Image (cartoon, rainbow, N blue to C red):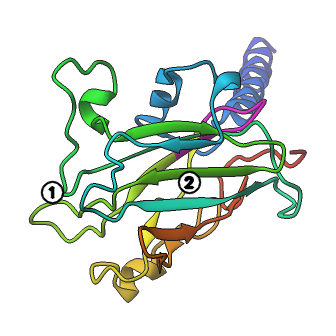
Amino acid sequence: MKNQWVFLLMVAMLTVTLHTFGQNKKVGGPCEGCEAIYESPAPFDKLETVVKLPDATWDGKKPLGINGVVYKADRKTPAPGVVIYIYHTDETGHYTAKADAKGWEKRHGSIRGWMRTNEKGEYKFVTLRPASYPGRTDPAHIHVTVKEPGLPEYYIDEYLFDDDPLLTADKRQKLENRGGSGILKLIDAGNMYKAERHIYLGQNIPNYPANQ
């Protein structure tokens, strides 16, 4: 009889543990470096919708302007108040940080920025096109983390460039399309390049709540 009670107690404890684990699974799964979104230089509610990254310049160069709309999980309702954090390599393919860099800037480099979608879900940033890592076959990319109201931060697919020869057919097939496709098709607008990417919250994001 005692053994039966011990067995029932163990089953009950295991059930509670599994239930708690299931409830506490992180939206988006593991995300090293996503916490850098909290290093924003301004409170989230004070962030601008349009941001110019530190490398952006028209001095003998053509910068890149990327804009889009962030939609809720229904893929049609604009999502206001979503914070977006981006960072990427410089034109040599390195994450170069300032001498006095702190926190994640030491690893992400100083070419990074934060923005917050407006009431129409819009966002935009201006930067220079990054280069791929020296001596490697990874396509050039821009990392992106999002933080929507009421949920923890999570990463979505990187911004990639459709004309990048390193973005092979095999690499395209392996993309997860988290938040929708991140492949950009650049348009030469004369004094700069432009591209558009819409973001769909929750799309292909593990553990994303069904009621969002």
Residue ID at (19%, 56%): 93
Query: What secondary structure is found at the residue carrying circle 2?
Result: loop
Q: Quadrant of residue 197?
A: bottom right
Residue indicated by mark 1: 92
Looking at numbered disc 2 in the image, what kind of residue is underneath it? Ile
Q: Quadrant of the N terminus?
A: top right
Above or below for 199 versus 54: below
Q: Position of residue 12 (x, y in %)?
A: 79, 23
Which label was assigned to residue 156?
Answer: 2
Magenta: main secondary structure equals loop
Circle 1 packing at 10 Å, graded few (<14), some (14-19), many (20+), is few
Tell me the SS state at disc 1. Answer: loop
Q: Position of residue 6 (x, y in %)?
A: 73, 15
Bounds of the magenta segment: 145-153
28 or 157: which is nearer to us?
A: 157
- 150 in the magenta segment: yes
Q: Identify whether 109 is placed above or below 200.
A: above
Residue 89 lies, with reference to residue 53, above or below; the image says below
